[in-house]
Image: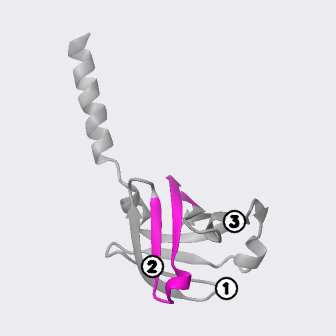
Amino acid sequence: MIKYTLPLFLFVFILNACAPTIPQKIKGTWQMGQVYDNSTNVTDQHNPKADRWITFFKDGSFKSGGAPFGKNEGKWIFYEADKVLYLDSNAGAEDDSYWVLQIKQSEMNWSGARSSFTERFRINFSKR
């Protein structure tokens, strides 16, 4: 039994070691989908033209755009320990935000964190 268990364990270990991390998965362009404020769907106010997007670059920068908020850019940092994404906006400290991330295949979900304002929000994205 042990001679079969060890190779299986090594296979699973190597497979997990090769799996992309969240910072690797996050890179690329994501299309905003639904937006919830305290479980109320507010997509019509926050993404009325269904054209909002965000792109994460491997150098740690991001760009975003779409109505009604327009373009934004800055730096992003992902804190692996608590699965938190920090967006450091060039628009100023009032636009900086923290989000708990969950990524499953081509879907990414954000839950606001570390501020009473963002904690109200849940946003989902699809990979473009």
Report the mark closest to the observer, 3 or 2: 2
Quarter residue 125 falls in: bottom right
Q: Quadrant of the N terminus?
A: top left
Whether residue 1 appears in magenta in the rendering, the answer is: no
Residue 67 circle label: 1
In the rendered view, would you say 68 is above or below 59?
A: below
Q: What is the x, y in percent for residue 122?
A: 65, 62
Q: Inspect the image, locate mark 3, and give the three-letter code of the amino acid beneath it.
A: Gln
Q: Main secondary structure of the magenta part?
A: strand
Q: Say which residue appears at 64% left-offset and 68% top-offset.
A: 116
Q: CA distance from mark 1 to mark 3?
A: 14 Å
Which secondary structure, mark 1?
loop
Q: Residues within 10 Å of mark 3 (few under 14, many from 20)?
A: some
Specify which label sits upstream in the sequence, 1 or 3.
3
Q: What is the x, y in percent for residue 89?
A: 48, 83
Q: Say which residue appears at 24% left-offset and 30% top-offset.
A: 10
In the rendered view, would you say 119 is above or below 104?
A: below
Q: Inspect the image, locate mark 1, and give the three-letter code of the amino acid beneath it.
A: Ala
Residue picked out by circle 2: 88
Q: What is the x, y in percent for residue 83?
A: 45, 56
* Residue 121 in view, yes or no: no
Q: CA distance from mark 1 to mark 2?
A: 20 Å
* Segment tinted magenta in the rendering: 84-110
What number of labels is visible?
3
Q: What is the x, y in percent for residue 90?
A: 46, 88
Which secondary structure, mark 2?
strand
Q: Is residue 85 left or right of residue 68?
A: left
Specify which label sits upstream in the sequence, 3 or 2.
3
Residue picked out by circle 3: 34
Q: Inspect the image, locate mark 2, and give the three-letter code of the amino acid beneath it.
A: Asp
* Residue 123 in view, yes or no: yes
